[in-house]
Image (tube, rainbow, N blue to C red):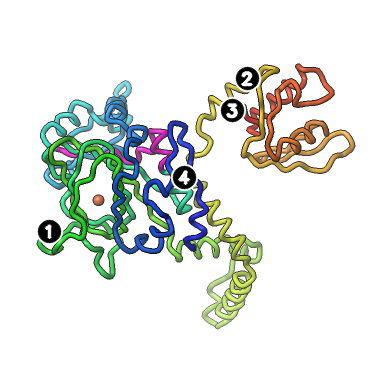
């Protein structure tokens, strides 16, 4: 995937604030030509004054205080090493039957008071602001990402020097943290591993991160961090870009869905050489299919599929459905981003295909939808021309529930 494709990525409205990928890393052309996959980047003051909208210590308190947080979402490290989860969990039971392991807030707080670093994994599963941050990365890299929060008490090291098997974007939220970052070694290893400081030599970056600073670490970059004067809260966004083998593998899998690859060969035949001949013919069919694939259409498919995995769309679905129930004649409506196929008219009605649903609507409704396709807003009372207000509102309500129309707030 070329950098220019990636640069088409949009910024995402977080409904409280908007951060773009360029807000985080600075000039994206420079980032992709000089840093991405190559060397660390320190972007000082990237989100200065804007970090509180991403996450607050109070929100992290609220998550710890939930009754049944599984330990997979909350980790504790002390003296550079992970603390076994049984030190801060209990078994939640219902009438004697064990339901799940859950975090015990008081034990977590005690571990923090005695110097432990607390880590909230997959914060994007809990907080809309973190989910939208992950969405910025999904848009940019067309692959999933995870937002992890680290809270470290003053005067403590977080984890011992190590590298991670993913790209990491560190965003300092509150307090300060001292970082040492070493040059990624040649022939970097993908798996997570610890390092002895004496093996690493002189750091390439040795700095104190303050709220709003962003630090990018390509996968495999050795790093160590410690909070000094005050409690430190930072977010790490982890991203594992899809490699060529992943992308090409997905294209091959897509082509293999064709009916010509449906058969069940009898592999026993291969002993006589026939199997090898049939396999050879199948490989030639695959090779022809690959040669005939349209790279532009295929990259669009890979981008769409990768971004869809973020799971950040469709939030506020219940709120949206509830709003459809209280539509008034004056409610201003517009087309949503949900794709709709409008079929030809049979003289009075036209077919619609929406999210796998097929329905027939009066031609005037189909025309009204076509009219809204390029933008524009219409009151619910006037959406369906030529009928009563009540019938127009009723039709608009049905299409709002399906997601075709949405309330225009501006
Ligand atoms: Fe790390």
Q: Is mark 4 on a helix, strand or loop?
A: loop
Which residue in the protein does label 3 denote? 410
Q: How far apart are marks 3 and 1 (CA)?
A: 56 Å
Work out how far the residue at label 4 is from the one at label 1, CA to CA, in angstroms. 36 Å
State yes or no: Cβ of the residue under disc 1 lies below 8 Å from any atom of ligand 1.
no
Foreground mark, 3 or 1, reads 3
> Where in the figure is residue 122, as x and y percent of width and height?
35, 41
* Image quadrant assignment for residue 255: bottom right
Q: Which residues fall within the magenta stretch?
A: 116-133
Instruction: Give how far apart the Cα atoms at labels 2 and 3 are.
Output: 20 Å
| Pointer 1 or 2: first along the chain | 1
- The residue at which mark 4 appears reads as 310
Q: Distance between the residues labelled 1 and 2?
A: 62 Å
Foreground: disc 4 or disc 1: 1
Q: Does the magenta stretch include residue 129?
A: yes
Give the mark toward the camera: 2 or 3. 3
| Cα–Cα span, label 4 and label 2 | 29 Å
How dense is the environment of label 4, judged by Cα within 10 Å: few (below 14), some, or many (20 and up)? many
Instruction: Write down the residue under mark 2.
Output: 325
Distance in Å between CA atoms under marks 4 and 3: 27 Å
Callout 3 crowding tier (Cα within 10 Å): few <14, some 14–19, many ≥20:
few
Q: Can you identify the residue that label 1 sits on?
A: 197
Label 3 near label 4: C-beta < 8 Å? Answer: no
């Amino acid at each position: 995937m070329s950098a220019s494709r990636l640069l088409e990525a949009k910024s995402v409205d977080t409904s409280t604030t908007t951060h773009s990928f360029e807000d985080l890393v600075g000039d994206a052309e420079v980032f992709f030509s000089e840093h991405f996959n190559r060397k660390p980047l320190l972007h000082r003051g990237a989100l200065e004054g804007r970090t509180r909208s991403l996450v607050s210590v109070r929100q992290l308190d609220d998550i710890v205080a939930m009754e049944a947080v599984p330990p997979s979402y909350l980790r504790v490290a002390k003296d550079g090493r992970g603390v076994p989860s049984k030190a801060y969990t209990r078994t939640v039971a219902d009438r004697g039957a064990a339901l799940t392991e859950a975090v015990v807030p008081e034990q977590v707080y005690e571990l923090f008071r005695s110097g432990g670093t607390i880590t909230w994994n997959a914060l994007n599963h809990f907080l809309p602001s973190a989910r939208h941050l992950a969405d910025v990365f999904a848009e940019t890299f067309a692959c999933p990402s995870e937002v992890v929060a680290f809270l470290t008490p003053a005067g403590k090291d977080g984890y011992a020097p190590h590298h991670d098997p993913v790209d990491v974007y560190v965003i300092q939220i509150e307090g300060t943290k001292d970082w040492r970052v070493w040059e990624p070694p040649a022939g970097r290893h993908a798996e997570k591993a610890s390092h002895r400081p004496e093996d690493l030599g002189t750091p390439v970056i040795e700095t104190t991160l303050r709220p709003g600073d962003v630090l990018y670490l390509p996968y495999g970059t050795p790093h160590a961090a410690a909070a000094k004067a005050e409690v430190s809260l930072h977010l790490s966004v982890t991203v594992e870009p899809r490699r060529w083998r992943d992308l090409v593998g997905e294209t091959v899998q897509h082509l293999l869905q064709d009916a010509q690859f449906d058969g069940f060969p009898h592999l026993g035949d291969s002993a006589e050489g026939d199997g090898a001949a049939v396999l050879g013919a199948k490989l030639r069919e695959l090779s022809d299919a690959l040669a005939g694939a349209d790279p532009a259409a295929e990259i669009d498919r890979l981008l769409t599929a990768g971004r869809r995995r973020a799971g950040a769309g469709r939030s506020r679905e219940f709120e949206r459905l509830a709003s459809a129930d209280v539509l008034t004649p004056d409610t201003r409506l517009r087309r949503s981003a949900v794709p709709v196929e409008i079929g030809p008219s049979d003289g009075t009605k036209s077919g619609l295909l929406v999210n796998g649903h097929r329905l027939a609507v009066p031609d005037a409704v189909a025309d009204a939808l076509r009219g809204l396709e390029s933008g524009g807003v219409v009151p619910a009372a006037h959406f369906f021309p030529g009928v009563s207000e009540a019938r127009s509102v009723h039709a608009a309500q049905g299409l709002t529930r399906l997601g075709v129309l949405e309330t225009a707030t501006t």
